Amino acid sequence: MTWLDSLEVPITEALKQFPNQVNVASVVTHQQTFLVSREALQDMERMQLGHLPLSAIALPYELSDILTRPQEENLIRDFSHHLSDFFPNFFVAAIYELQSLLNLQNLNAYIIGGITRDMLLSSEKRYEIQDVDIIVEGKAIEAAHDIDEKSKNFSLIQEFTPFGTAKLNYREQVHIDLASTRKEIYLGCGLLPEVVELGVPLEEDIIRRDFTVNALALSITKPGQVIDCLGGLKDLEARTIRLLKPASFFEDPSRIIRAVKFAMRLEFTWSEDTVLLLDQFLTWMPAVYKGGGDRIREELYKMLCHPESDLKIQWLHFFIEKGLFRLIDTQIPNKLALPVSLEEISGRVEILKAHLSEFWNDDLTWQIYISFLMMGIPEQSVESAMHRLGLTRSEIEVVEKSFRLLHENILYPLTPFDNVAKLYEMFHPLPLGTACVGIILSSQFETCLEALVKYKHELEQITLEVTGDDIIKLGIPQSEQIGKLLKALLHAKLQGKVHHRLDEISWLKEYITNSLEESHS
């Protein structure tokens, strides 16, 4: 049904004129038809974005599947005879016992999201299950208590009354987070959602999720049945990431980074309508969203810590070219100028990780990539960006010291054959993340890396057992000389001339005596 002929009408005004008794209506402009849903208009108005034009959420007719697909025609696939192909036997047993216990309460329950998605993507892998999220169409805490009372295999570990959730343990083998299905609304762009109703039907719970492939429900009460309310099976087969609704990025901008992350991990592409909705959000982002926060940080961390690959590089290019780094802080100019290419960063991170495997973790990968992102934005924007992203004090130290290495290139002359004292003095004050950034920046990457490996394996743990107080007891007054003596002693220990506390004291006595004799001669 056509009700307007312009996409520039404010959403609030369009909602007032929206045709009665329809959920989706069309706008015909310049001989092209766009579709808009009543639900999307209401979502935007609740977020106080009613002043934006219809163009922010309208979809061309040919890209409007998420608006026109009939929810009442749910697709169901039966995997009841294949559950043991995907899951450990103890987990299959837990599912069937839960089925029996929940049937006694007349409750439907489902596993939604990653486990169901990944099960459908693989016909060979048997998943290691340690934690699982299950939703029930009812009161989760009451259901958990009943399960705990009626079963010797399930025990109630915790309940979270404010959130209406509970944690169960099945025979010390798997933790189950039990939650009620719920309906949520967003009252502002990027704000946490508010729960307005618990125990809603499955279809109302699923629509609050992010992408169609993450909205597939594996039934507990009918074990093995996969229920698809929103076209997720079709998108899974097409290996496509697709939003569930037009206002989704406005509700939670961190979903943008999640979509990039899933494309990397699953080797999926984005649907055309999702790319279009991204562009529409980015048009208005600086006016409606500040950026940063815990969810952006969490998703950015996961994305940047994804294993190095050509696909990761490809999607990081997308992240930069689309200006998605501005999700950190929307006041950052829409241009990122990295000091070295993504290909070089990724390739050198992989080499560093191989040579420093015993010291490596995801935090180190994160520190390296976030330092390069900060280097790519104008320097006057860095402090605000780090604040909005909520970097810790140690992470800020890595970034700030990385800037120093960028400007001074002080690691350039290092080789593994340098004096050990020089290597120690160069690397010891640097966080490992900063040292890695400096090596990636270096035109002498291989030799600098060898120098760092030598420091980490041979020198880093060398410390003095004596202190300034010990030197004072040897008759040296409190002065700058104490610091010089400690430094000289450390150099001696780095060179293997002393090994333990008694050695250190003997060396100091001899050194002090020789120094006094030289001063008198």
Image (cartoon, rainbow, N blue to C red):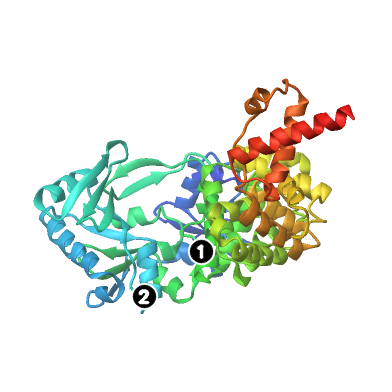
Give the image location of residue 450, x and y in percent: 70, 62
Residue found 69% across the figure and 58% down from its top:
320
Residue contact between numbered discs 2 and 1, judged by CB atoms under 8 Å: no
Q: Dot 2, crowdedness within 10 Å: few (<14), some or many (≥20)?
A: few
Residue found 77% across the figure and 44% down from its top:
404
* In the depicted structure, whether residue 84 falls above or below residue 330: below
Among all residues in the image, which is located at the extreme right?
A: 521
Give the image location of residue 474, x and y in percent: 67, 25
**Sooner in the amino-acid sequence: mark 2 or mark 1:** 2
Along the line of sight, the residue nearer the viewer: 337 or 375: 375
State the image quarter where residue 96 is shown: bottom left
Residue found 75% across the figure and 31% down from its top:
512
Q: Secondary structure at mark 2?
A: loop
Q: Secondary structure at mark 1?
A: helix
Give the image location of residue 249, x and y in percent: 54, 52
Three-letter amino acid code at the position of disc 2 = Lys
Q: Which mark is residue 262?
A: 1
**Does 363 sit left or right of 102 as displayed?**
right
Along the line of sight, the residue nearer the viewer: 114 or 333: 114
Judging by the rendered image, the residue that carries numbered circle 2 is 125
Three-letter amino acid code at the position of disc 1 = Phe
**Residue 493 visible to an observer of this rendering:** yes
